[in-house]
């Protein structure tokens, strides 16, 4: 086999992931709150960045032109040529003092604080109070004891009987059922404290909770020697009890605030998108360092450092503006497609894919995916995550499409209006939807029903 060496030229095309491009992609994926935090970190790292309160578009344009004349190595028009022609709607913010509404939110006691208040009012010994404090500290968010009495006895070096006695005292506290070790004990405590005297109800809780959940009423009736109607009556009593007595006490960490990235408002017969810029500070170039850059020797280390930081600052400002433009275009396209939903409600939500929006905006599908990730929008119908508008759908008899959320809404209304003694089966629901022109199978009906957390017809049936 003969081996030869030769020189040849070949032309290839590849995408180079520069640090600036990675930064632009990262910024596009950030939500409004995350972007605000990202900007704060950049302000700490880059001395040339500054916050401008009165930062208009003309200021940005003039500033960029000045810096472009100083450094011709950055070709902004070429980098964002396909995006520069789109002008998002800008609303001039009023210069007024903003109110932090968090200061008006009243704090509620946690479950542990609520129980400790009652523990201080109980007549326990010093050792009993120590045991009670330890037990309360080991309750989970639902009010169940997350540790065994044997472990408490061993850790505190007290007798198991003392632990059991203190636990019984805690189980008398409000909310009823708190301090239970399992669901059965929780329900039995509530039955006892609420004075429920229904016959066989304790036997039902102790031995047949699984059968009750699975709808095996006939098996329960045969075992307890009662009628199906009596089983139904006992179930109606049990559903009035709270299986998670501690869930009404939430901690501050459980509260999550949603700040919409944009607002869709109706102007005339059209919907327009207004971007939420209130949480993202406006960036500009610090005038002191800008003047310093022109006065120092261009070959000095100071000039090189400032030039490097200036490039980073300009890229950041450009990336933030590019994120704003892209997000505005995507949301505006969604509003145009889902106009019927914004006008009439959930039942008119149309099936939509990211590829459709990508084709409308003229960007790649992956860019749409990054743009809608973790973003929320405020509409006349409420606040929704942008991913909510991208729904799969089923084809109708007339060739149109109906979104999955619309079908679920129709199914829920049908089930809410059904005869409880003769509930609609999945096949019956599928037949009704097919009569309305929605082509759907029984299997798909069952899938949507389970996604909505609705029980099957056998478990919904009353006797």
Image (cartoon, grey):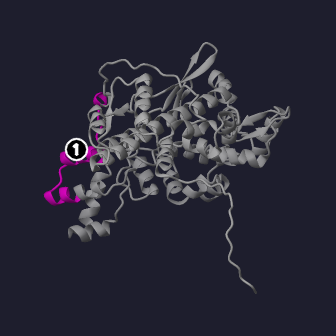
Q: Is residue 194 visible?
A: no
Image x and y of residue 378, in percent:
51, 28
Magenta region, residue range: 103-131
Tell me: residue 318, above or below residue 186: above
Query: Is residue 129 found inside the magenta-colored segment of the image?
Result: yes
Q: Residue at 15% across / 56% down in the picture?
A: 125
Secondary-structure class at tag 1: helix
Which corner quadrant holds the C terminus? top right
Q: Residue at 74% across / 35% down in the picture?
A: 402
Nearest the viewer among 210 and 383 is: 383
Tell me: residue 165, above or below residue 332: below
Nearest the viewer among 262 and 115 is: 262
Q: Is residue 425 left or right of residue 68?
A: right
Which corner quadrant holds the N terminus? bottom right
The residue under label 1 is: 117
Q: Is residue 125 left or right of residue 91?
A: left
Q: Is residue 208 visible?
A: yes
Q: Residues within 10 Å of mark 1 (few under 14, many from 20)?
A: few
Image x and y of residue 293, in percent:
30, 39
Q: Main secondary structure of the magenta part?
A: helix
Tell me: residue 149, above or below residue 121: below
Quarter of the image where one finds residue 391: top right
Q: Residue at 54% across / 35% down in the picture?
A: 77
Q: Residue at 66% across / 57% down in the picture?
A: 12
Quarter of the image where one finds residue 288: top left
């Amino acid at each position: 086999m003969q081996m030869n060496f030769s020189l040849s030229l070949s032309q290839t095309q590849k995408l180079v992931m520069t640090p600036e491009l990675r930064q632009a992609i990262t910024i596009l994926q950030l939500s409004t709150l995350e972007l605000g935090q990202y900007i704060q970190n950049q302000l700490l790292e880059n001395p040339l960045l500054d916050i401008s309160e009165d930062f208009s578009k003309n200021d940005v344009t003039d500033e960029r032109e000045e810096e472009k004349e100083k450094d011709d190595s950055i070709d902004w028009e070429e980098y964002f040529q396909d995006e520069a022609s789109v002008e998002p709607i800008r609303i001039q913010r009023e210069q007024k003092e903003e109110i932090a509404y968090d200061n008006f939110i009243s704090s509620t006691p946690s479950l542990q604080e609520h129980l400790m208040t009652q523990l201080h009012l109980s007549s326990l010994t010093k050792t009993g109070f120590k045991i009670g404090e330890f037990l309360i500290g080991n309750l989970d968010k639902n009010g169940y004891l997350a540790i065994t009495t044997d472990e408490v006895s061993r850790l505190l070096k007290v007798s198991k009987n003392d632990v059991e006695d203190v636990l019984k005292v805690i189980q008398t506290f409000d909310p009823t059922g708190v301090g239970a070790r399992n669901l059965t004990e929780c329900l039995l405590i509530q039955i006892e404290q609420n004075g429920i005297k229904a016959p066989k109800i304790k036997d039902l809780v102790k031995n047949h909770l699984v059968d009750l959940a699975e709808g095996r009423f006939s098996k329960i009736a045969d075992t307890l020697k009662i009628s199906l109607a009596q089983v139904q009556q006992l179930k109606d009593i049990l559903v009035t009890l709270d299986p998670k007595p501690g869930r009404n006490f939430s901690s501050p960490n459980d509260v999550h605030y949603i700040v919409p990235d944009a607002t869709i408002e109706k102007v005339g017969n059209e919907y327009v998108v207004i971007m939420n810029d209130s949480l993202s500070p406006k960036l500009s170039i610090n005038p002191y360092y800008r003047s310093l850059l022109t006065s120092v020797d261009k070959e000095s280390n100071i000039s090189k450092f400032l030039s490097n930081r200036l490039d980073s600052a300009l890229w950041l400002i450009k990336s933030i503006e590019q994120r704003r433009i892209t997000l505005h275009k995507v949301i505006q396209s969604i509003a145009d497609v889902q106009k019927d939903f914004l006008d009439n409600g959930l039942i008119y939500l149309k099936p939509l894919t990211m590829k459709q929006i990508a084709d409308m905006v003229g960007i790649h599908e992956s860019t749409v995916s990054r743009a809608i990730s973790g973003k929320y929008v405020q509409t006349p119908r409420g606040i929704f995550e942008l991913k909510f508008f991208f729904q799969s759908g089923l084809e109708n008899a007339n060739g149109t499409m109906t979104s999955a959320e619309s079908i679920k809404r129709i199914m829920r209304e049908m089930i809410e209006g059904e005869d409880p003694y003769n509930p609609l089966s999945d096949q019956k629901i599928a037949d009704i939807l097919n009569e309305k022109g929605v082509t759907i199978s029984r299997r798909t009906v069952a899938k949507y029903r389970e996604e909505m957390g609705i029980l099957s017809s056998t478990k919904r049936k009353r006797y």
